[in-house]
Amino acid sequence: MSDMGIDQVLAQMRTISVQAQTPPVSGVDKSAEGGADFSEMLKTSINQVNEVQADAGKLVKSFEQGDPNVDISEVMIALQKASVSFQAMTQVRNKLVGAYKDIMNMPL
């Protein structure tokens, strides 16, 4: 290893040491750090699934009313997207409920 490589490693170690010695700040605003609020992410995801289902419903209604601009393949694809997104959301919910139960059953 060259002298330049050793100097870089030592500088990184010093930087990490300083960061490790700095106490964490409590009550930090997560939006300032770039972190995301879990509840907001979940709410956004649920709203997106709702929008996909609403769009599929609109396409179905337009097709049933005989709109010439709506093709059956578009309707079927939209319905499948809505179905897959709903199933994925259901699986996420099931995992969250399972994790919650596991946490609640942990001994103190």
Image: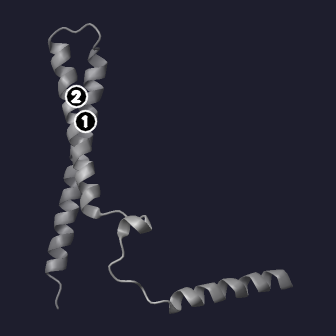
**Residue 68 visible to the viewer:** yes
Across and down, in percent, residue 36 comes to 35, 62
Residue carrying label 1: 52
Q: Reply above or below: 36 against 62.
A: below
Give me the disc on residue 56. 2
| Secondary structure of residue under mark 2 | helix
Which amino acid, by three-letter code, is at mark 1?
Val
**Residue 52 as seen in the image, left or right of residue 64:** right
Across and down, in percent, residue 59 comes to 22, 22
**Residue 72 as seen in the image, left or right of residue 33:** left
Q: Identify the residue at horizontal 22%, vertical 45% (top origin).
A: 47
Q: Nearer the viewer, residue 20 or 74?
A: 20
Across and down, in percent, residue 63 comes to 20, 14
Q: Reply above or below: 7 against 73.
A: below
Q: Identify the residue at horizontal 72%, vertical 88% (top origin).
A: 10
Q: Reply above or below: 100 against 83.
A: below
**Residue 1 visible to the viewer:** no
Task: Tell whether label 2 touches label 1 (CB within 8 Å).
Answer: yes
Marks 1 and 2, how far apart in space? 6 Å
